[in-house]
């Protein structure tokens, strides 16, 4: 199974950019990189995903290394509401019946 | 769309009791799954289903049963509750395919005494 490695925790100040790293050196060529986050006392929610190219959406940007062995989730201006656990996940399994395996993620603290 | 709904939100059981956690989705998703999350931990996959009538085991299936008689519903049954099953349970659903976004329910907080 392809695995990911993330820092246990990170800290940021409000309105500053945040770069959350993820290493996935055993990623296979067809694995998508997914990011989810979990706000306190809530279920996880989708943030962004990508395959090879960098991706942007209203929540964040995803920068994927050229060799795809690492990626970075970028929050352009952190707010207090972005304080959450962020999970970097690789698709686990082939075809359409893959599983998403969650690790411990990165706990992001945003200081006012 | 209501998305993924779970009932109940909270439940307290005594050791040995059985119960069913309900999960429903109205997005016509083929894939549904159950996770548990213990304090300070990530989510662990219990069981999953790739469509009505098809279920399979995840990482921690012991002590739990599932069935999938319809696309919409995916109940999780605890056969004989144990204190080790005290946890928060999340149900999720998604479309098939490599880019499918997974939607999670709000969770059920279960305490087994």
Image (cartoon, helix red, strand yellow):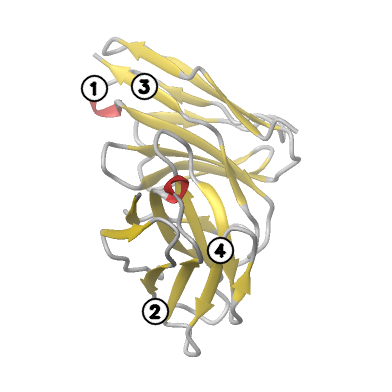
Q: Is residue B32 above or below residue A104?
A: above
Label 4: which residue?
A60
Label 1: which residue?
B83
Indicate the secondary structure of the residue bearing disc 1: helix
Q: CA distance from mark 3 to mark 1?
A: 10 Å
Q: Residue at x 47, y 68 (%)?
A: A73
Q: CA distance from mark 3 to mark 2?
A: 36 Å
Label 3: which residue?
B110
Mark 1 vs mark 2: tell me if same chain.
no
Asked if residue A71 can be seen in this view, the reply is: yes
* Position in image of residue A41 (x %, y %): 41, 33
Q: CA distance from mark 2 to mark 4?
A: 24 Å
Q: Residue at x 72, y 35 (%)?
A: B71
Label 3 crowding class (10 Å Cα cut-off): few <14, some 14-19, many 20+?
A: some
Nearest to the eye among marks 4 and 1: give it.
4
Give yes or no for contact between labels 3 and 2 (Cβ–Cβ under 8 Å).
no
| Front residue of this view, candidates B111 and A6 | A6
Label 2: which residue?
A26
């Amino acid at each position: 199974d392809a695995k990911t490695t993330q820092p246990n925790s990170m800290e940021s100040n409000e309105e500053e950019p945040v770069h959350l790293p993820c290493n996935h050196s055993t990623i296979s060529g067809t694995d998508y990189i997914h990011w989810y986050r979990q706000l306190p006392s809530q279920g996880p929610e989708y943030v962004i995903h990508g395959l090879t190219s960098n991706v942007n959406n209203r929540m964040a940007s995803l920068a994927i290394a050229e060799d795809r062995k690492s990626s970075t989730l970028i929050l352009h201006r952190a707010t207090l509401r972005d304080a959450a656990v962020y999970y970097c996940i690789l698709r686990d399994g082939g075809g359409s019946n893959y599983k998403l395996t969650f690790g411990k993620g990165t706990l992001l603290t945003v200081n006012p | 769309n209501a998305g993924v709904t779970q009932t109940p939100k909270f439940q307290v059981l005594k050791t040995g009791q059985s119960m069913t956690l309900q999960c429903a989705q109205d997005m016509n998703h083929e894939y549904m799954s159950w996770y548990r999350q213990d304090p300070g931990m990530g989510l662990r996959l219990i069981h999953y289903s790739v469509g009505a009538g098809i279920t399979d085991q995840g990482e921690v299936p012991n002590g739990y049963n599932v069935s999938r008689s319809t696309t919409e519903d995916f109940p999780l049954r605890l056969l004989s509750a144990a204190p080790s099953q005290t946890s928060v349970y999340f149900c999720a659903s998604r479309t098939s395919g490599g880019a499918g976004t997974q939607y999670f329910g709000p969770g059920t907080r279960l305490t087994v005494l």
